[in-house]
Image (cartoon, rainbow, N blue to C red):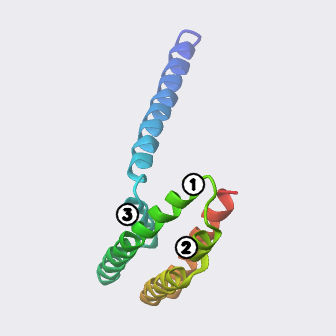
Amino acid sequence: MKRKLPLILLLISLAFNAFFVGGFFWAKAKMKQAHSLEERAWMLAEKLELTEEQSRTFANLLERYQKLRDQKQPRREEFWAEMLKDKPDPQVLEEYMIGLAADEYRLQMLDLIQEFMDSLTSQQREKFVERINNRRSSSK
């Protein structure tokens, strides 16, 4: 038995190392997937266990969201161009943050979120809000 003990301990150690290395590469692959907004959104959708119809709705909403962001891009570039100036114009900055276009963008985002929430079951809505809140609390 004394001769087998070191061999058994060695095998257990090798097994733990293999699990550790495997877990590392699995986690690394998962993190690479989460670089783009679309990939993170689909990871969330996977966690919510969407039905086929909900997935189609989600894909449509995601596409509309990306178009909305693309439309905002020129305004975002103007904002940062203004921020680069030695003396940025406060009115230009304020217009970007709280002007009519900013209000319209937020209202369109609200419509997308509401449409998504309407497509979910009550349990999925709870899980979605829980994940959003967990994400916010972990980033503090």
Q: Residues within 10 Å of mark 1 (few under 14, many from 20)?
A: few
Q: Residues within 10 Å of mark 3 (few under 14, many from 20)?
A: some
Residue name at image x 70 percent, y 57 percent = 140
Q: In the rendered structure, which amino acid carries the disc numbered 1?
A: Lys
Q: Which circle marks residue 96 in the picture?
A: 2
Give the quarter of the image for residue 75.
bottom left
**Place of residue 26 in the rendered image (x, y in percent of width and height, measured from the top left):** 42, 42
Of the residues tagged 3 and 2, which is closer to the observer?
Answer: 2
Q: CA distance from mark 3 to mark 1?
A: 33 Å
Mark 3 lies on residue: 38
Q: CA distance from mark 1 to mark 2?
A: 16 Å
Give the quarter of the image for residue 126.
bottom right
Mark 1 lies on residue: 85
Disc 3 or 2, which lies upstream in sequence? Answer: 3
Q: CA distance from mark 3 to mark 2?
A: 25 Å
Q: Do the residues under discs 3 and 2 have CB atoms within 8 angstroms?
A: no
Q: In the rendered structure, which amino acid carries the disc numbered 2?
A: Tyr
**Place of residue 108 in the rendered image (x, y in percent of width and height, measured from the top left):** 46, 85
Q: Is residue 28 left or right of 125 when viewed as pictured?
A: left
Q: Secondary structure at mark 1?
A: loop
**Place of residue 72 in the rendered image (x, y in percent of width and height, measured from the top left):** 42, 72
